[in-house]
Image (cartoon, helix red, strand yellow):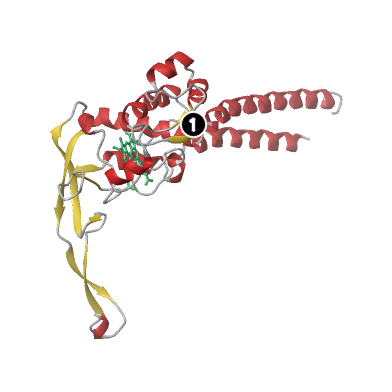
C-alpha cells in the first residue's frame, strides 16, 4: 500500500510538471522562437484586433465564427461586431475575406490562402519569422520579398509599423567537396568545386543573405514590432485550435481532481492502517 501511494504521488508530480511546458511549447526549426502565449487571452485579443485591421482584407478564417470569438475571447457581441467585423458579416457567420478569390489571384498572382489552420500547419515559429522577414525588392511585382518564404506574393502589410527592411547579400563562395564519379559529371580526382553560402546563411535567388536591416524607421521600434507580430501569431495559433483555451482551463480542474483524490486515498490509507502495527 505504501509503495502504491508513493507511486501515485510520483506520477501525479510528473503529470503536474509536464503539463505546463507541453501546453506552451512551440515547434522548433532553427528559427528564433515565437514565444507566444496562446493561453494568454489579452495577447490573443490584441492579435485578433491586428488580424481584423491588417489581414482580413485578403485572408479568411473559414473555420472561425464571430460568435465563437466572442465566447472564447471574453468579448460581448457588440464589441466583436464593432471592433472586429468590418465586412458586414452576421454574428453567427464565419470570417470570410471581402476580397473575391478570383480577383485576388489576378492581382497577387496567387489567391491569399485561408489562414484557419496556418498556426498549426506551418507552426507559430514559422508564422512569426515570416511576418518579420519582408524586405524591399524592386524585382518583385509588389516590391517586396521575404527571407523565410522567398518569392512570396504577399506584400509587407505591416511595413508602416516595422519600417522598410533592406537586405544585404554576398555572393556564394567556392568550396571543394568530395565526390565519386567521372569528370563528365564534374568530379575530378574525387573532388568537385561547388558554390555555396557560408554556414548558416540563407540562399535567395542564388545569393547569400548577410542581414536584414530597417532602412527607414516605422512607427514601432524592433521590440514593439516583435510584440505586434507575437500577438498576431498567438491569434493565428488560437484560430487553428480554439479548443486549446478550453482544454487548458479543463486541465487545471483535472489536476485539482487528481490532487483531491490523492488526498482522499491518503485519508483512507491512514484509516485502514490505523490498527496495524
Ligand atoms: C494584400 C493582400 C494580403 C494581405 C492584406 C495579407 N496577406 Fe498574407 N498572403 C497574401 C498572399 C497573396 C499570400 C500567398 C503568398 C504566396 O503563396 O506566394 C499570402 C500568404 C500568407 C501566409 C503564408 C501562407 C502559406 O502557408 O503559404 C501567411 C502566414 C500570411 N499570408 C499571413 C498574413 C497576415 C498575418 C496578414 C495580416 C498581418 C496578412 N497575411 C495580410 C496576401 C495578403
Side of 153 relative to 143 (left or right)? right
Side of 206 relative to 13 (left or right)? left
Q: Where's residue 66, x and y in %?
A: 48, 25
Residue 36 can be seen, yes or no: no
Snapshot quadrant of residue 158: top left
Q: Where's residue 7, x and y in %?
A: 69, 38
Which residue sits at x=42%, y=40%?
114
Q: Where's residue 118, x and y in %?
A: 43, 41
Q: Camera-side residue: 139 or 91?
A: 91
Which residue sits at x=22%, y=59%?
198
Which residue sits at x=36%, y=27%?
52
Side of 131 relative to 144 (left or right)? right
Residue furthest left in the image: 215
Q: Camera-side residue: 234 or 77?
A: 77
Q: Where's residue 105, x and y in %?
A: 33, 45
Above/below status of 199 relative to 67: below
Residue furthest right in the image: 275
Which residue sits at x=48%, y=16%?
77
Q: Camera-side residue: 132 or 240?
A: 240
Label 1 element class? strand
Above/below status of 203 relative to 37: below
**Residue carrying label 1:** 64
Residue 41 can be seen, yes or no: yes
Mark 1 neighbour class, 10 Å CA radius: few under 14, some 14 to 19, many 20 or more:
some
> Ligand 1 is found in which quarter of the picture?
top left
Side of 12 relative to 209 (left or right)? right
Looking at the rendering, in which quadrant would you find the N terminus? top right
How many numbered marks appear? Answer: 1
Snapshot quadrant of residue 260: top right
Is ligand 1 within 8 Å of the beta carbon of the residue shown at mark 1? no
Amino acid at each position: 500500500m505504501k509503495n502504491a501511494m508513493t507511486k501515485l504521488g510520483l506520477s501525479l508530480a510528473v503529470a503536474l510538471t509536464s503539463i505546463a511546458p507541453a501546453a506552451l511549447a512551440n515547434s522548433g526549426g532553427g528559427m528564433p522562437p515565437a514565444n507566444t502565449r496562446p493561453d494568454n487571452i489579452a495577447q490573443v485579443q490584441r492579435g485578433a484586433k491586428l488580424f481584423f485591421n491588417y489581414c482580413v482584407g485578403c485572408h479568411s478564417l473559414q473555420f472561425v465564427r464571430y460568435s465563437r470569438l466572442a465566447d472564447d475571447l471574453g468579448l460581448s457581441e457588440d464589441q466583436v461586431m464593432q471592433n472586429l467585423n468590418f465586412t458586414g458579416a452576421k454574428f453567427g457567420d464565419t470570417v470570410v475575406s471581402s476580397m473575391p478569390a478570383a480577383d485576388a489571384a489576378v492581382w497577387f498572382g496567387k489567391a491569399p490562402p485561408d489562414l484557419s489552420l496556418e498556426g498549426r500547419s506551418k507552426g507559430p515559429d514559422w508564422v512569426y519569422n515570416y511576418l518579420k522577414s519582408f524586405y524591399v525588392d524592386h524585382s518583385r511585382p509588389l516590391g517586396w520579398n521575404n527571407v523565410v518564404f522567398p518569392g512570396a506574393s504577399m506584400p509587407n502589410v505591416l511595413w508602416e509599423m516595422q519600417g522598410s527592411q533592406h537586405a544585404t547579400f554576398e555572393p556564394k563562395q567556392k568550396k571543394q567537396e568530395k565526390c565519386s564519379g567521372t569528370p563528365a559529371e564534374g568530379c575530378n580526382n574525387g573532388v568537385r568545386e561547388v558554390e555555396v553560402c557560408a554556414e548558416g546563411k540563407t540562399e535567395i535567388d542564388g545569393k547569400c543573405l548577410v542581414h536584414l536591416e530597417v532602412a527607414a524607421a516605422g512607427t514601432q521600434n524592433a521590440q514593439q514590432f516583435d510584440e505586434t507580430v507575437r500577438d498576431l501569431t498567438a491569434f493565428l495559433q488560437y484560430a487553428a485550435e480554439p479548443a486549446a483555451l478550453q482544454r487548458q482551463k479543463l486541465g487545471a480542474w483535472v489536476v485539482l481532481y487528481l490532487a483531491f483524490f490523492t488526498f482522499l486515498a491518503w485519508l483512507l490509507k491512514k484509516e485502514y492502517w490505523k490498527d496495524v502495527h
